[in-house]
Image (tube, rainbow, N blue to C red):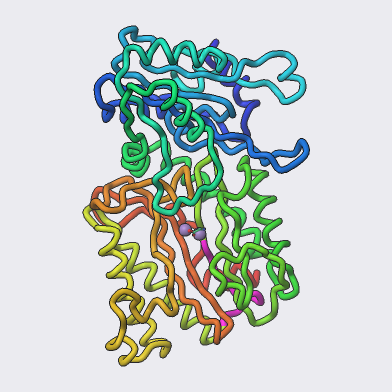
């Protein structure tokens, strides 16, 4: 009962329903099982990034501390020390001290009881105690795990709280050794727990609602930003914070600009519109792309190219099974795409015979990757050099981009790798077949 009351209080903090702390306990156990003896690992929240004057960007929690604790609040630190002499020091959470003043101006922050309910961590301190507690534990430890960002697509210029912590820690404790958290996180975050797959499914279901709303709304003359607004309306009313990533709503030739995010053009009769849009839910992403005709009817050529992309997507999906190697998978998908481009008359045999193996001919029309891990981050952590495993979640997103024909078509679903057989499609209910899309648009 007491726990129920605490959960009710916590519900007021976030739009999403509280996640059971068992998930975070399992996540921490997986991380700690891979730590070296006598080591401490530290995970920091993100900063709240300034705009100017007193304006700030909305807070986005660092996905690692979230994954390991569930704490969705700024200025929090998680400390893991599996070999701590005193058991209560094996997992410690530090949160910003809350008070009446903060409650009135910003809204209540987690108190110690609530922080325990969210995370399953019994030892909770105010952040102001961190230096003292950390110093005491460092006298028992030999090594510190730093949480650097080694994501294959990362490109960060800002100094994060993690970066500042690393600089200070190296200065204060020069006789300790250092280790990296990221390789462990890449590996464990890449394989999802059942609870996480449910949350991703939930995000996909919200995306579906947005797409169905847009299918009814779209007609010639509508502006791309009006479609963006329709998606956002549906997302927020379903307890999502909004887009999992900046949406691409690209009509006509805009679809050939891969990262088109202006969404500021008018949709014209006869054009296709590519929409790469996903809702977030409880910080989990969904990542969907659908390409549909502005006027509700596909021309013969649009249909031909669309069917080709859909076939590539279906064939690629079937390759996502345990044991598949990501790099080899991309080579195989490239072969399927090459054959479709030959059939469409976009490539000829000579193009393929003379192709550069490092940049095959198909890349002229399909220049991005087919799949990435998806989860707490849209381009999620996950092993890419070792064989695929069950419960990894990948996107499948082939496209054919033909600026000369004023069209770009991409189709993207999110799928879970199964123990056996084809992957499970988390977007199975989001219309993708031409007949269904045309039907829904013309109702
Ligand atoms: N929306 C980003 C991607 O598809 O990878
Ligand atoms: Mn996408
Ligand atoms: Mn994607």
Q: Is residue 80 left or right of residue 277?
A: left
- Bounds of the magenta span? 289-298
What quarter of the picture does the C terminus occupy? bottom right
Closer to us: 139 or 430: 139
Q: Quadrant of residue 142?
A: top left
The quarter of the displayed image where residue 231 is located: bottom right
136 sits left or right of 126 in the view: left
Q: Is residue 66 above or below residue 419?
A: above
Q: Residue furthest left?
A: 323
Residue visible at 35% across and 47% down in the picture: 382
- Membership of 93 in magenta stretch: no
Q: Position of residue 87 (x, y in %)?
A: 34, 9
* Residue at the (32%, 82%) spot, across then down: 339
- Determine whether, in the image, residue 80 is placed left or right of residue 129: left
Q: Position of residue 431 (x, y in %)?
A: 51, 63
Q: How many marks?
A: 0
Quick check: can you spot residue 90?
Answer: yes
Task: Say which quarter of the image contains residue 274.
Answer: bottom right
Residue 418 in the image, given as x and y percentages of width and height: 29, 50
- Quarter of the image with the N terminus is top right
Nearest the eye: 100 or 79 = 79
x 61%, y 78%: residue: 253
Against 302, is 72 above or below?
above
Q: Is residue 297 above or below residue 175?
A: below
Is residue 5 at least partly visible in the picture? no
Find residue 323 and report its horizontal and vertical position in percent.
21, 54
Q: Residue at x 35, y 19 (%)?
A: 81
């Amino acid at each position: 009962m007491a726990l129920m009351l605490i959960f009710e209080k916590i519900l007021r903090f976030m739009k999403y329903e509280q996640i059971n702390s068992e998930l975070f306990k399992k996540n921490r156990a997986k991380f700690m099982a891979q730590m070296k003896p006598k080591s401490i690992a530290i995970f920091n929240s993100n900063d709240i990034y300034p705009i100017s004057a007193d304006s700030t960007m909305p807070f986005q929690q660092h996905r690692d501390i979230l994954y390991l604790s569930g704490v969705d609040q700024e200025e929090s630190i998680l400390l893991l020390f599996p070999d701590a002499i005193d058991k209560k020091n094996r997992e410690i959470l530090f949160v910003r001290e809350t008070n009446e003043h903060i409650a009135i101006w910003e809204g209540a922050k987690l108190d110690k009881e609530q922080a325990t309910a969210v995370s399953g961590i019994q030892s909770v301190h105010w952040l102001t105690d961190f230096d003292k507690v950390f110093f005491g534990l460092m006298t028992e430890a030999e090594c510190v795990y730093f949480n650097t960002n080694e994501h294959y697509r990362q490109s960060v210029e800002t100094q994060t709280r993690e970066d500042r912590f690393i600089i200070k820690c190296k200065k204060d404790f020069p006789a300790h050794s250092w280790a990296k958290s990221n390789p462990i996180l890449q590996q464990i975050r890449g394989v999802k727990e059942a609870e996480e797959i449910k949350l991703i499914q939930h995000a996909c279901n919200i995306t579906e609602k947005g797409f169905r709303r847009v299918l009814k709304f779209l007609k010639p003359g509508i502006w791309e930003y009006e479609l963006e607004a329709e998606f956002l309306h549906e997302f927020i009313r379903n307890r999502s914070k909004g887009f999992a990533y900046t949406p691409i709503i690209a009509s006509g030739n805009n679809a050939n600009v891969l990262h088109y995010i202006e969404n500021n053009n008018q949709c014209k009769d006869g054009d296709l519109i590519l929409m790469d849009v996903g809702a977030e839910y409880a910080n989990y992403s969904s990542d969907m792309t659908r390409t549909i005709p502005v006027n509700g009817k596909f021309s013969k050529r649009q249909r031909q190219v669309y069917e080709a992309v859909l076939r590539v997507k279906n064939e690629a999906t079937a390759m996502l099974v345990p044991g598949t190697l990501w790099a080899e998978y991309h080579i195989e998908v490239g072969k399927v795409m090459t054959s479709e481009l030959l059939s469409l008359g976009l490539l000829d045999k000579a193009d393929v015979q003379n192709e550069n193996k490092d940049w095959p001919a198909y890349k002229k029309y399909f220049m991005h990757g087919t799949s990435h891990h998806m989860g707490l981050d849209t381009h999620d952590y996950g092993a890419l050099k070792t064989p695929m495993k069950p419960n990894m979640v990948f996107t499948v997103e082939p496209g054919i981009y033909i600026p000369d024909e004023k069209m770009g078509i991409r189709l993207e679903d999110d799928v879970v790798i199964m123990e056996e057989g084809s992957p499970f499609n988390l977007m199975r209910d989001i219309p993708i077949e031409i007949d269904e899309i045309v039907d829904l648009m013309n109702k």
